[in-house]
């Protein structure tokens, strides 16, 4: 059974939130992977059809 959020204990501090200005410093790309096809993404990741088993 889960505890409703309003009944959970609250913390006094939170983690740092990334904004647009410090996201690039953290290594997060601003534009993302827009315009890339699935095939291009799989090739970039080094994944090939031989990596999957036919059923």
Image: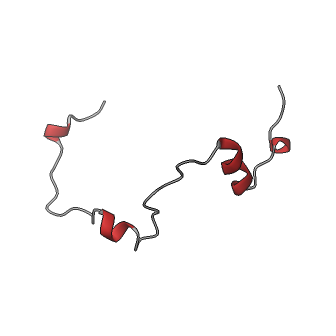
- Count numbered badges in the picture: 0
19 versus 4 height, above or below: below
Give the side of residue 5 with respect to residue 18, left or right.
left
Quadrant placement of the N terminus: top left
At a point 31% along the width and 69% down the height, the residue shown is: 21
At a point 29% along the width and 33% down the height, the residue shown is: 2
Give the side of residue 45 with respect to residue 11, left or right.
right
In the displayed orientation, state which residue is furthest to the bottom: 25
Give the side of residue 38 with respect to residue 31, left or right.
right
At a point 56% along the width and 47% down the height, the residue shown is: 35
6 versus 31 height, above or below: above
Q: Quadrant of residue 22?
A: bottom left
Quadrant placement of the C terminus: top right
Q: Quadrant of residue 11?
A: bottom left
Asked whether residue 18 appears in the rendered view, the answer is: no
The x and y percentages for residue 23 are: 37, 66
The x and y percentages for residue 17 are: 28, 62
The foreground one among 6 and 49 is 49
The foreground one among 32 and 10 is 32
In the displayed orientation, state which residue is furthest to the top: 55
Q: Quadrant of residue 30?
A: bottom left
Asked whether residue 20 appears in the rendered view, the answer is: yes
């Amino acid at each position: 059974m889960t505890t409703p959020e309003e009944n959970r204990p609250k913390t006094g501090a939170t983690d740092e939130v990334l904004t647009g200005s410090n996201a690039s410093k953290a290594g997060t790309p601003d534009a993302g992977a827009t315009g890339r096809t699935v095939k291009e993404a799989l090739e970039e990741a080094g994944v090939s059809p031989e990596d999957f088993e036919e059923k």
